[in-house]
Amino acid sequence: AQSVTQLDSQVPVFEEAPVELRCNYSSSVSVYLFWYVQYPNQGLQLLLKYLSGSTLVESINGFEAEFNKSQTSFHLRKPSVHISDTAEYFCAVSDRSLRGNQGGKLIFGQGTELSVKP
Amino acid sequence: NAGVMQNPRHLVRRRGQEARLRCSPMKGHSHVYWYRQLPEEGLKFMVYLQKENIIDESGMPKERFSAEFPKEGPSILRIQQVVRGDSAAYFCASSPARGRPAGELFFGEGSRLTVL
């Protein structure tokens, strides 16, 4: 079984400040790791994912996350946030051994609400 | 290029009534997932369906909940005899038959059920 813990339910920051949203997971099997973002009144969108290879993954809008196997973490970072980054961020894992679209069975954390203030 | 469409966006029911939530996947997608988000909690997997087949319903409550994805038309999540504890946001997600890595889902905006 897997579980995901997002350590901060709310993170308020000022515009242009750096931010880190923390995610730790527990699993008895190998997992894929994801960050999804939910902007107000919208559905969740995939932000970035770690499947294999380089442990540092990046999104097109400046976020990055690093897979740390020894610490079972997948923290999300951005060096300088914008007002438009205000959203809820969800960390998720899926079991690597699940075949094909069975991998769509995701285990989500509770979410972190990022609030960027001017 | 419509995304995943869910309706209704908001639904209010009294205890004991039935709730039906609909989900039309993205064009070309034949796999549908339903997730539930209870207040102050993360999304929890409920069920995974392909056209005319339930593949994995391990997250569905044993009673009152059912899901279908017919050959024609949207996927439907049905909750019979609703109780206050069913109040939640219900999200639908879809993925194509092939070509996407595991876990890369396209989500709808959710249906928010309130039970009075």
Image: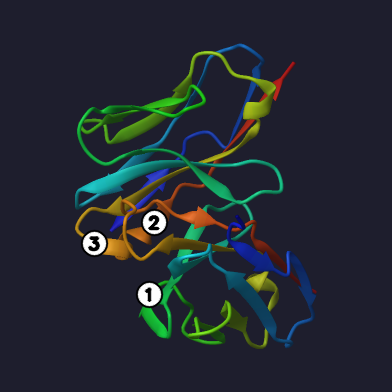
Expressed as whole percent of the image width and height from the top left, the position of residue A2 reads: 31, 54
Q: Are marks 1 and 2 on the same chain?
A: no
Residue pointed to by mark 3: A98
Judged left or right of residue B74, residue A51 is: left
Please tell me whether mark 1 or mark 2 is closer to you in this view: 2
What residue did someone put label 2 on?
Answer: A106
Mark 1 residue crowding within 10 angstroms, few (<14) / some (14–19) / many (20+): few
Screen quadrant of the C terminus of chain B: bottom right
| Mark 1: amino acid | Ser
In percent of width and height, residue B1 lies at 60, 55
Residue in the picture at 66% in, 30% down: A86
In the image, residue B16 sits, relative to residue A84, either above or below, namely: below
The amino acid type, in three-letter code, at marker 2 is Leu
- The CA distance from mark 3 to mark 1 is 14 Å
Q: Which mark is residue A63?
A: none
- Distance between mark 1 and mark 2 Cα atoms: 12 Å
**Amino acid carrying mark 3 in the image:** Leu
